[in-house]
Image (cartoon, rainbow, N blue to C red):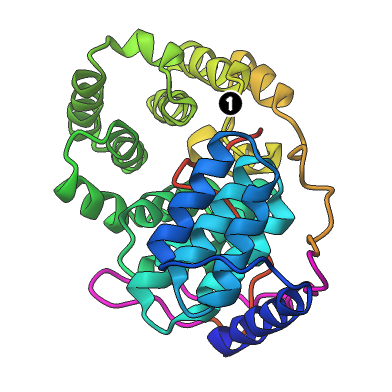
Amino acid sequence: MLVVAIAIIASTQVAMWISAGPPALPGSVEDRLEKAAELAHRGSPGADEAYRATTVTFPEDVRGWLAYGDHLASKGDDAGAEAAYQGACGASENRAKTAPAWRRLGMIAWRHARWREAETALNQAVAGEDHEAERAYALFRATVRHSDDDEWARRILERSPDDAAMLLLVATWMALAGHADEAASLCARACSALDCAPAALAGASDPWVRYLAARLHAANGDAPAAAACLAGALAHPRRPALERAHLLGDPAFANPPAVLGAVIGEWPERLPEAILPAPERAGVPPAAPVAETPAPTIGSPPATPRSGTDAGGAGGELPAVP
């Protein structure tokens, strides 16, 4: 079982950190994390030890592991963050409590091009009803797996009707299905939410909006507009974490005219972090490969994967190149 595997990893992590002799800090989890945050804010090297000691003293409190993982992730230590988030996943069997950790695991897995692990981790986060994970999962299914199931996006829109990315996602499915009027209506709603004209989507602050707008324009047969939006997404310093093969296999970009094909050809063949091996930290070995898992359906939790994930990640920001 995945949770058992993560629990074993977490217990190994705790045993090693206990043997390292973390400093004794009095107080509750809240007090310790507040102190650690103060140290981190001042740039003190003692912040690492303060967070680490909290997870050793309170190994079953998910909050300590999450805070430590976020701290390490903020410093660019994906491997360390991964180990801490794995600790969080093994600290509790409460899906709602561990869902944020699973989401973070999925985010870095996605950035490192570990696609199956990313999907599995997001799957687990969705099972805990993590709203940010649902949004990421919808995007992953559409842009990486090329699923034409719009249920997740529509569910998110019921909760957040002005989510421009989800509006553009559903609009593209409508355009591909031949429902031009509904696609246009959804696109207009997205532009209204962003307070911009359709032509301005190429310069949206969110790189995913630029990319999704490119997909919609391509589905509508407007190659110049699609090329402009895709070029905008490509030029963004945090472009969507996708590889060229994802664009070439996307039905929205099928048989692109030359003007659009040229921009697709400029998209990187591989993510810059894809060549990195599965991270190891403090003696924690990479987990076993993750088996494919079926997509969850609305109204029921995702299937529990059969083996562990070896990815970690930061926060709620959608995966993008660093």
Against 281, is 87 above or below? Answer: below
Q: Residue at x 63, y 43 (%)?
A: 246
Against 97, is 224 above or below? Answer: above
Secondary element under disc 1, as helix, strand or loop, is: loop
Residue 169 versus residue 285: which sits nearer the camera? 285
Q: Position of residue 195 (x, y in %)?
A: 22, 14
Q: Amino acid at mark 1?
A: Pro
**Is 296 contained in the magenta span?**
yes
Residue 289 versus residue 2: which sits nearer the camera? 2
Q: Position of residue 322 (x, y in %)?
A: 66, 33
Q: Residue at x 37, y 66 (%)?
A: 126
Tell me: 302 left or right of 115.
left
Q: Residue at x 73, y 76 (%)?
A: 287
Against 38, is 209 above or below? Answer: above
Looking at the image, can residue 319 be seen? no
Q: Position of residue 275 (x, y in %)?
A: 84, 48
Residue that carries the numbered disc 1 in the rendered image: 256
- What is the span of residues highlighted in magenta in the rendered image? 281-304
